[in-house]
Amino acid sequence: MDAHTLSAEEKILLTQELLNQAYKKLKLENRREPMHELISTMLSHRTTHADEEKAYYTMLERFGDWEGVMNADFDALADAIKTTRYPGQKVPQIQQTLHMIKEERGEISIDFLKDLPVEEAIDWLTKLPGVGLKTATLVLLFNFHKPVMPVDTHVFRVSQRVGILGAKVTANKAHEILLQMLPPDPVVLYNYHIHLLWHGQRICTYYSPQCGKCVLNGICNYYQDVREKGIDEAE
C-alpha cells in the first residue's frame, strides 16, 4: 500500500483502529480531581511525569491546600516545585491562576466547568496565566468528558509523521483539525489521545523511531519515505 494515496480522513480512522488493537480500548475515567489536573498540567511543561508528581505533592505537603499555595512566599514555593523545569516562571502563573479562580468563583474550584459549553469553558481556562489550549482540553476531556482533542507533542508528532496532519500545521491548529476528523465521542477522543501518547513515547519517538516495529508503518508517510531511501534506523 502506498501511504501517500490515503486521505487524512482514511488515515486517522485506520490509525485509531490499529492502535486500539495494539493498546486495547480504554474506559474514560477521571485520573485525578480537576484542580489537581489543572495545576499538575501546568507543572508538567518540559518536565517528566515523575518530577511533576514530586513537585505537586511536595507543594501541597508544605503549604497544606490551595489557599496556602496561593499565599506562599515566592522562594519557598519555587523550592517546593524545583523538580520541574522553570520553577521561577511557574510560581507566578500558579499563584495568579489560583487568585483569579478564587476572585471569580469565591472558592478555588473549577467544578463549574462541567456545566459550561465547550467553547465557553476553553475561553475561560485559556484566560488563566500559563494555561494554553493543550492544558484546557486535557482538563475538559479527562475531568468533564467534553468532546475536545488534546494535542501534546506525541499526538502531534505521530499524526504528522503518519500524514494525518500537514507539515505546516501548528500544534494549536491540530486540535481543531483532528477533532473534525474524529467522531465527537469523548471515549474515542480519549483513546486517540492516550494511544498516540503511548505510541510516541514507546515506538514513534522523536530521535530514534522504531519504524520496523510500528503497527502504523503500512499507512505512514514517514516510514515509507525513509524506507524507500534505505535509511530506516529500525532495520
Image (cartoon, rainbow, N blue to C red):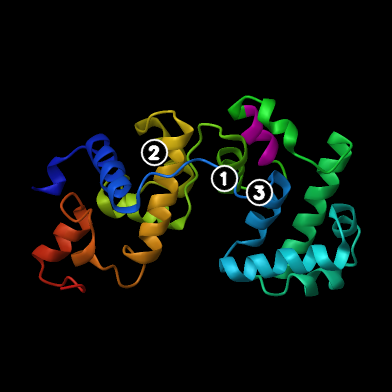
Q: Position of residue 106 (x, y in %)?
A: 89, 36
**Is residue 22 toward the left or the right of residue 124 in the image?**
left
Q: Quadrant of residue 58?
A: bottom right
The dot on residue 178 is 2
Residue type (three-letter) at the residue carrying disc 3: Val
In percent of width and height, residue 98 lies at 81, 49
Q: Position of residue 61 (x, y in %)?
A: 82, 66
Q: Nearer the viewer, residue 222 or 201?
A: 201
Residue in the image at 63% along x and 55% along y: 41
Secondary-structure class at tag 3:
loop
**Is 218 included in the stretch rendered in magenta?**
no
Disc 2 marks which amino acid?
Leu
Which secondary structure class fits the magenta region best?
helix
Residue type highlighted by circle 1:
Leu
Q: Is residue 212 left or right of residue 75?
A: left
Q: Image height check: is 164 above or below 207?
A: above
Q: Which residue is mark 3?
A: 131
The quadrant in which the C terminus is found is: bottom left
Give the magenta range: 120-126
- Residue 62 shows up from this direction: yes
